[in-house]
Image (cartoon, rainbow, N blue to C red):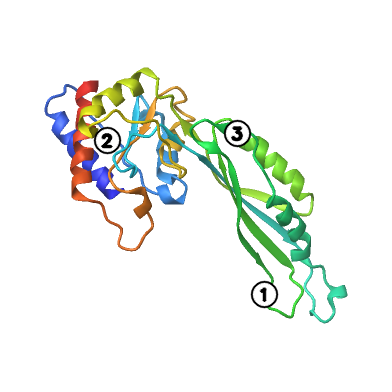
Amino acid sequence: MKSGVAAMVCAAAQAARHMDGDLVVQIYGGEETGCEGSFHMAAQPQFLRNIAAVVVAEPTSCRPLCGHKGALWLTCKTTGVTAHASMPHKGDNALAKLLPFANAMCSFHLEGDHPQLGAGTCVISTLHSGCNSNSVPDSAAMTIDIRTVPQHNHDDIQAVVAAMAGPDISTTTTLDIPAVWTDPDQPWMNRAFDVLTPLLGHRPDVATVQFFTDAAALRPRLPNVPMMILGPGDPAMAHQIDEYCAVEQIELATKMYAALLADWA
C-alpha cells in the first residue's frame, strides 16, 4: 500500500505541473481494520464533490481490476450459568446452546453467483467459551466471515442468520463492506483499458479480487461512478513476513497513474 501511495503521489505531482486548477490525492488510513479512514472521509460531502471516476491504489500486480467481494462479519454470543463440571445440572451450558447454530452455519449457503466475482462464502472463523476445563461455560461466542457479491443484500443476510440463531443467541455486525463492481464496458473503464494497453503490452483482461478495498466505502456514496483497483505489488505478498514491492512495479504504476491523469486532463 505504501508503494501505491508513493506512485500515486508522484504521478499527481508530475501531472499537476501541466494542469489548471487543483489536483487532490485522497489518502486514507485504517483499511485493514474495516476501511475506517475511507468510511469517515466518505461521510464528509466536501471530499466527494465532482468525482466522476475512482482509482484505488491497492496492490494488484499493476493489473486494472473491476471489483471485489463484499465482507459481512458477525459476532454471535450466548450466555448461561456456570457450575462445577462434576455437577452440570446446576449450570446452564452456553456452549451447548451455541454449537447447534454453529453446526448449521457450517452448511450456510448464499444463493446466486456473479459472472466475474463468483459465489459468496461463509466461514466460522473463531469460537470461544468458558474459562477452564472443569466448569460449565457461562458464555460462548463465535465470529462469522461472510463474503458477498453485488446481488447479495447484507440486511437480508443478517436477518436470515439472526433467525437461524434464535432468541437465545445475539448477533452483532462488526464489519459491513459492500461488494464493488464496475462493468468493463462502462465508457471510462473501456477508455482507461485503452490508455493502459501500451504500458502493459496487451489489453487488460476482466479481473477481480476476493479481498475488500477502500472502494467499498465510496461505492454506496458514488453508486454510478466507475471504480478501478490498480496498484503495484503482488497481492500474494500481503500480510507476509518481509513484505516488499518490486521497484519496476512502482515505476510502472507511476506511469499508469500519470497516463490516466493525462488522458483525463
SS for callout 3: loop
SS for callout 2: loop
First in sequence: mark 1 vs mark 3: 1
Mark 2, other Cα within 10 Å: few <14 / some 14–19 / many ≥20: few
Residue at mark 1? 131
SS for callout 1: loop
- Give the residue type at disc 1: Cys
Disc 2 and disc 3 in contact, CB within 8 angstroms: no
Disc 1 and disc 2 in contact, CB within 8 angstroms: no
User: Where on the picture, by quarter, is residue 95?
Assistant: bottom right
Image quarter hosting the C terminus: top left
Residue at mark 3? 152
**Residue at coordinates 69% horizontally, 49% vertically from top-left?**
107
Where residue 123 sits: x, y (%)?
60, 52
Q: CA distance from mark 1 to mark 2?
A: 49 Å
Residue located farthest toward the front when viewing the structure as drawn: 202
Where residue 206 sits: x, y (%)?
39, 30
Where residue 217 sits: x, y (%)?
45, 37
Left or right of 77 in this view: 115: left
Q: CA distance from mark 1 to mark 3?
A: 38 Å
Q: Nearer the viewer, residue 67 or 94?
A: 67
Residue at mark 2? 25
